[in-house]
Amino acid sequence: MILNTKLAMPVQIFDEWVNGQAENYEYITGEAVAVSSNHKASWLAAKLLILIGVFVLKHKLGRVTGEAGGYKIAGERYIPDVAYISYARQPELSSEGFLSNPPDLAVEIISNPSNMMEQKRLRVKISNYLLEGVTVWVINPDAEEVEIHRNNHPVEIIGKDG
């Protein structure tokens, strides 16, 4: 994800303000950060959403959300590129706002590896996801690798050769 515009504000103000915005915003370290994507990251997210979604639907495990599905994570507000949330964690979905329960899996796709601010915010998000018990896949399409982050496990890095 590319993170552009940022506005500092308390989370309570963010929760009211964000509902009237035309674009998606995340709330990271006290700032509202505009979220946008590029074609490559969007295509990859769509492909993963389909693959994970088919598996989840087939096995009746829960729901899969895309780039507009937001979650409250450790007092912040995140919109992963793809997320899975089990029926046990979230029996019903809300039609507005960010879900109070964290997803079981969050997929974050790096759209610009050379953007240091994006990398810094991503590391904050990974830490907070892990605090909430969320498994995180960080996909770097340029490097053709996936980092798998799980609580109490070392980071696993899988390259294109497996």
Image (spheres, rainbow, N blue to C red):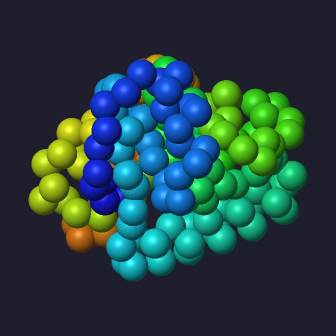
Residue drawn at 47 percent across, 77 percent down? 43
Residue drawn at 42 percent across, 22 percent down? 10
62 or 96: nearer the viewer = 96
Q: Quadrant of the C terminus?
A: bottom left
* Total numbered badges shown on the rendered structure: 0
Whether residue 82 sits left or right of residue 30 in the image: it is right
- Residue 141, given in percent of the width and then of the height, sits at 31, 69
- Residue 77, given in percent of the width and then of the height, sits at 50, 34
Q: Is residue 111 above or below residue 56?
A: below
Residue drawn at 65 percent across, 61 percent down? 52
- Residue 31, given in percent of the width and then of the height, sits at 33, 33
54 or 29: nearer the viewer = 29
User: Residue 143's image quarter?
Assistant: bottom left
- Residue 150, given in percent of the width and then of the height, sits at 46, 32
Residue 136 makes an appearance in the image: no
Residue 34 makes an appearance in the image: yes
Residue drawn at 38 percent across, 52 percent down? 34
Whether residue 34 sits left or right of residue 106 in the image: it is left
Whether residue 55 sits left or right of residue 75 in the image: it is right
